Image: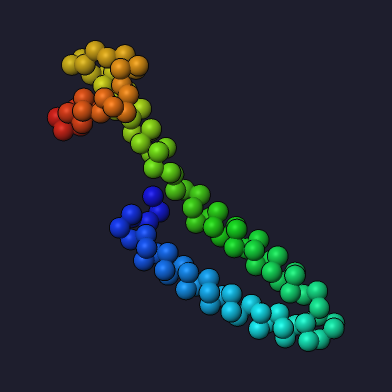
Amino acid sequence: GVVHPSERSAANGVTAVARSIAGSLGPFFAGQLYSNPKYVSYPFFVAGSVKIIYDILLLYSFISLKPSHEINAEQQKSLWLQLKSSKDYDMNESELSPINTSTMKDYQNRA
């Protein structure tokens, strides 16, 4: 995952502080813009622009990160191919399930 399970509460605290600071600054700046009738619609455009930039930055930050279940599936498939090419093991793919990982671990330890 993105954050180790033992560090999730600390990471949540950091992001909560950042969100509350940003949430307290937004009304101040919006109030300044609302005070002038010429800029009444600007807070909506600013908020939309910031949201688009935020989403693009999040996408850019996490685009190369794969979920752990996808990584495990790729590792399992890779080990299956290694086992299949090995002459020591004669298994078909249906026998290689998440429950049958001891064979894969034995193979990893030997390699």
Residue 109 left/right relative to 90: left
Q: Quadrant of residue 4?
A: bottom left
Which quadrant is home to the C terminus? top left
Q: How is the image coloured?
A: rainbow
- Say above or below: 53 vs 76: below
Residue 87 left/right relative to 26: left
Residue 109 left/right relative to 65: left
Coordinates of residue 49 in the picture (x, y in percent): 69, 66
Residue occupying image coordinates x 26% and y 25%: 100
| Residue 82 in sight here | no
- Say above or below: 34 vs 67: below
The residue nearer to you, when weighing 88 against 93, is 93
The residue nearer to you, when weighing 46 against 60, is 46
Residue 3 left/right relative to 60: left
| Residue 86 in sight here | yes
Coordinates of residue 9 in the picture (x, y in percent): 37, 63
Q: Quadrant of residue 54?
A: bottom right
Coordinates of residue 38 in the picture (x, y in percent): 85, 82
Residue occupying image coordinates x 56% and y 60%: 57
Q: Quadrant of residue 74?
A: top left
Residue farthest to the right, as pictured: 38
- Say above or below: 35 vs 63: below
Residue farthest to the left, as pictured: 110
